Every structure is written in C-alpha cells, then in structure tokens.
Amino acid sequence: FDGNTAIAYVFASIIAGGVASILLCPMESARIRVVTDQDYKGLGLIQCLARLIKEDSFASLFGGIFAMLSKQVPYTIGKQVS
C-alpha cells in the first residue's frame, strides 16, 4: 500500500468492521431475546448470554453475523475513508 493510503484505509475499515461485528453480534442476540421473549425479560447481559448458550448453543449467538457484517462493514468504510 505504498503511497496509496486510501486502499490501506479501506482494508483497515473492513477489518475493523469485521471485528466490531464479531464482538457485537452476541450482544445484539441477547438484546433481541430480552426484547422479544417474556421469559428473558429483566435479565442482564451476562445472565441472558449464559442462558442463550445453555438453551441454544454458543453458535446461536452468531446467527445474525452475516446481516451484521453487511451493515457494519460498509458503515465503517464510509466513516473511516470519508
């Protein structure tokens, strides 16, 4: 990327958006469950995540990862490159 900082910023933004999606996806899964399922109402983040893992599986926390990536990566590119 010598001399072309725009390409370096785009790649850095893709990586940053991917990392953000991986970190945010379990929290988003917990938030959605707390909002939509009365059995989860009133649970905190840690309690909700523990219950989701116990009842569904660890992988279920990342069920929306592709949707999250398709939203987060372009947003991050637009924010960091512009």
Image: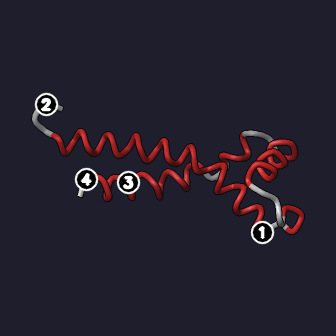
Callout 4, which amino acid? Val
Mark closer to the chain start, 2 or 4 = 2
Classify mark 3: residues with Cα within 10 Å, few (<14), some (14-19) or many (20+): many
Mark closer to the chain start, 1 or 3 = 1
Callout 3, which amino acid? Thr
Callout 1, which amino acid? Thr
Q: Is residue 9 above or below residue 81?
A: above
| Residue sitting at the far top | 2
Question: Residue tagged by mark 4?
Answer: 81
Question: Residue tagged by mark 3?
Answer: 76
Q: CA distance from mark 3 to mark 2?
A: 22 Å
Q: Report whether 44 appears left or right of 66.
A: right
Mark closer to the chain start, 1 or 2 = 2
Q: CA distance from mark 4 to mark 1?
A: 36 Å
Q: Which mark is residue 2?
A: 2
Q: CA distance from mark 2 to mark 4?
A: 17 Å
Classify mark 2: residues with Cα within 10 Å, few (<14), some (14-19) or many (20+): few
Q: Is residue 5 above or below residue 27?
A: above
Q: Is residue 14 above or below residue 34?
A: above
x and y percent of residue 32 in the render? 71, 63
Q: CA distance from mark 4 to mark 3?
A: 8 Å
Q: Which mark is residue 36?
A: 1
- Give SS at disc 1: helix
Q: CA distance from mark 1 to mark 3?
A: 28 Å
Q: Quadrant of the N terminus?
A: top left
Residue in the image at 73% along x and 53% along y: 45
Mark closer to the chain start, 3 or 2 = 2
- Give SS at disc 4: helix
